[in-house]
Image: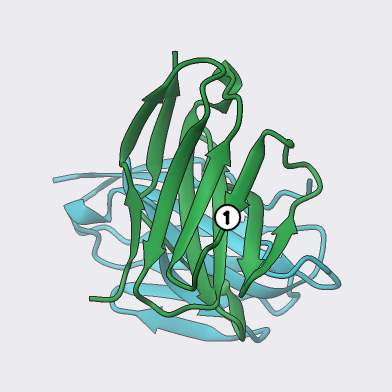
Amino acid sequence: DAMVIQNPRYQVTQFGKPVTLSCSQTLNHNVMYWYQQKSSQAPKLLFHYYDKDFNNEADTPDNFQSRRPNTSFCFLDIRSPGLGDAAMYLCATSRRDRPYEQYFGPGTRLTVT
Amino acid sequence: GQQLNQSPQSMFIQEGEDVSMNCTSSSIFNTWLWYKQDPGEGPVLLIALYKAGELTSNGRLTAQFGITRKDSFLNISASIPSDVGIYFCAGRRAGGTSYGKLTFGQGTILTVHP
């Protein structure tokens, strides 16, 4: 089945220690998104890639970066995680012509100690 | 940022009952979507709506794009235990310029008692 895969499902990192989360997809979608979701809240868009074009949301902290080496893979880098960055990180994909029909991965739960 | 007002915040129902929830905004939306999120998982797209007045079904789920374009409704018929989860409405605000950016409601937590 075509899907969005996120690894790892659970990640523990230390305060200030860089961490990378990964996402891959077999849907062959052109657009990939990264969201942050904190407990009892709706997902919050961090940025997206439209093909190779990176689009940052205005309120996404500089601490968050992303890379998309090819169509299938996308990475979220947190350069210096703070305690406030503990959250579920969700990757999503969509077709170019239906950007609002987004298909989410299972998420990575990040804990910062 | 702009939030959608989703209600109710939570529902406790008996298996077999029908469920209704809605989402409203003070702004006009030109796309409405409904997602379900199970604990510890990502949201799953249930239904997407693109036209005012549109009524779309997905199994036991039916959603409507309100005529005023400021609201949407989701109904679940004959609920079963696996309907448990958080239901989010989401939409694209008319005149919004940010590609792919969804505005989300706060979610409705559904609990189904067997």
Q: Could you tell me if residue B103 is visible in this image?
A: no
- The structure residue drawn at horizontal position 66% and vertical position 75%, both measured from the top left corner, is B31
Q: Name the residue at 48% across, 43% down.
A: A89
Q: Nearer the viewer, residue A10 or A54?
A: A54
Residue that carries the numbered disc 1 in the rendered image: A67
The colour with which the image depicts chain A is: green
- In the figure, the cyan chain has which letter? B
> Can you give x and y, in whole percent of width and height, for residue B37 in the image?
38, 51
**Outermost residue, front direction?**
A69
**Disc 1: which chain?**
A
Q: Is residue A61 above or below residue A98?
A: above
Q: Amino acid at mark 1?
A: Arg
Residue A55, image x, y percentages = 73, 60
**As rendered, which of B1 and A32 lies closer to the eye?**
A32
Q: At x 54% / y 65%, what residue is drawn?
A: A32
Image quarter of residue B18: bottom left
The x and y percentages for residue A90 are 47, 49
Position of the C terminus of chain A, as image quadrant, is top left
